Amino acid sequence: MIVKMKFLSISGPKNDIDRVCDVYLSKYEMQLENAIAELKTTDNLQPFVEVNPYKEPLAKAEQFTALLGDVNKKADVSMSKEEMMDMIRDINHDYLRMLEQKELLKKKADDLKERLNVLEPFRTLELDMHKAPRYKYMKIRFGRIGVDYYKRLEKYLFDDLNAIFIESTRNENYVYGCYFVANADSSKVDSVFNSLHFERITIPAAYVGTPAQACDELQKEIDDNQKEIEQLDRNVEQLMRSHASQLLGAQKKLEGCSNNFDVRKLAARIEEGEEEDKEDYYILCGWMGEDDVKKFLEESKNDDRVFVVVEEDREKFFGDPPTKLKNPKFFKPFEMFIRMYGLPSPNELDPTMFVALTYTFIFGAMFGDVGQGLCLFIFGGLLYLTKKMNLAGIISIAGIFSTFFGFMFGSVFGFENIIEPRWLRPMEAMTKLPVVGQLNTVFVVAIAFGMALNLLVMLFNVLNAAKAHDLKNMLFSNNGLAGFVFYGFLVFTIVLYMTGHKVPGNILMVIFLGIPILMFVFKEPLGNLVEKRHEKMEEGKVMFLVQAFFELFETMLSYFSNTISYVRIGAFAVSHAAMMEVVLMLSGASSGSTNWIVFVLGNLLVCGLEGLVVGIQVLRLEYYELFSRFYKGTGREFKPFNSVKEEQ
């Protein structure tokens, strides 16, 4: 059902707005509207221009609580706003200092790793890194040369060069090492190596010992540096954990303070009184449920700092109120389907209960099996209780109806010899009809059920049109009273004929079929007549009749296709039984030697795959065959201030 909404305005001293939000708006659900936009007739309204002072502290508190991880601490909400601000400021000072130290250590680590990467290829060289660059009569060059060029160097030049090349390491592309050359020959040798694309690598002379010893020393510095970084991380964690309760409490209170302050975005302020005695007042306005309005007025009647005005019949002048759904817990999960399609407007019926009953009933008829139905009920119920998933709740309730139809069809995990059917077996029951001949009974019942549903939703459309004061749609549309009479009489005639009874005479046919058809054709002029509108026909009479003919043809076609669409209920009931016969045959159950692995896997496959397909098909019936006849779903969702706080 849809909760009846009231529009109200709340006002009081400007400095009292936070208290009102905290005491009243956090307790009663109210959707706030922009006061300046809504109260157009009120003079001297001004917006609030203050900057939210709680945004930055709240962001810091959220950042710090995120660093806590999983802590089993109770939030300490005893601190005042000033104490919270001081605490967050002090923690932030220590935190930023530690972050600065950590950044310096990271830069040092990057520098050490870069130096190690340069020195690592020369690890195997046996020379003193401190002394070698300082030799008096020779020079040493470190670097790398391509493998192909190194082979040419070995083959042609080593014998002619006054230099010694010592290889260190090599990979698939390069040979790393160094060469020694006398000072007198250094220019010639350097030019030869350069011509062979020898890449010089500068090694600082600050290292002591062999390259291996220098690499080990660098690695030790890197490890020590990493330990300092890890210690800083532990210090940060310890800092946050030592203030865990206060941080959790500060975050909670600052969220409330920040959200309360943000109410000013939708509020208006007004100055009243003489120039020297002017006082600032706030004005909040929005929608609240009728029951909440009564409780709010009762609680605030003795509060002389709060003034509440309830606007009567405001929606007639300023638009429709938001839609708030309130249904019993059993039907609550099915609100998900309604939200997917669109919420009802205040002038529409809430179809939640109707969808819940028809969806689960049709699902059960298409998927009738005692064993699989119980599995859906248990699995969906457990998932709904633990995860609060609406879809799981729907599956659980649908499982109840699957179990019911399983008893009606006499099917338990596909076995049809365990219990006797309380009604029929879908694959065996046949009905003889005039003209049609033998037809599966489930198909006949499905079409009859679809006809009854079509008539019911036509009545829903009449009620919706009456609530919206839409006389044209209520009286003359193909889903209004004219359509109900036409389709109802047609169904009545078909039922009489198929059951061997005498059908109505020609006069009744003309009255109950001909008159509604004329109403369909002349819906526009008749609607203008009853609604006392004097609109001229824009197109000519011939064009009007041609358009009316095609619209009438489309209407008749929709009646037929809409009715035949319900055959899928019987088709899936029969196909489910057929699929389970295949599972029993493959598992050997039908021959008496059951392979339980195949049997269980087959049931899981049918239960999962067919259950998914049936669920989608039933939802299609709801949306396209039922909703299209009576439901628009043009409502806007009710978003109360306190639920926005919880989401944030």
Image (spheres, rainbow, N blue to C red):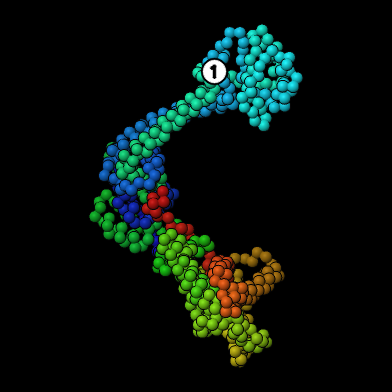
Q: Is residue 174 above or below residue 388?
A: above
Question: In which quarter of the view is residue 578 placed?
Answer: bottom right
Q: Amino acid at mark 1?
A: Met
- 427 shown above or below 159: below
Residue at the image position 53 percent from the left and 21 percent from the top: 210
405 horizontally vs 566: left or right: left
Residue 458 vertical placement versus 163 (above, below): below
For image coordinates 65% across by 86% down, the residue present is: 438
In the picture, measured across the screen, residue 377 lies left or right of residue 622, that is left
Estimate how packed mark 1 is, as few (under 14), some (14 to 19) or many (20 or more) residues with alpha carbons within 10 Å: many
In front: 477, or 219? 219
Q: Secondary structure at mark 1?
A: loop
Q: Which residue is mark 1?
A: 129
Nearest to the observer: residue 491 or residue 424: 424
Residue 302 picture location, percent across and down: 24, 55
User: Residue 188 location in percent, x, y?
Assistant: 70, 11
> What residue appears at the point 35 percent right and 48 percent down from the top-left corner?
283
Where residue 392 appears, x then y in whole percent? Answer: 47, 64
Q: Residue furthest right?
A: 156
Q: Furthest residue to the left? A: 302
Residue found 69% across the figure and 27% down from its top? 147
The answer, for residue 222, to whether it is visible in the render is yes
Closest to the observer: 155 or 381?
Answer: 155
The answer to whether any part of residue 349 appears in the image is: no
Q: Is residue 56 left or right of residue 360?
A: left
Across and down, in percent, residue 300 comes to 27, 55
Give the position of the N terminus as an image quadrant: bottom left
Total marks in image: 1
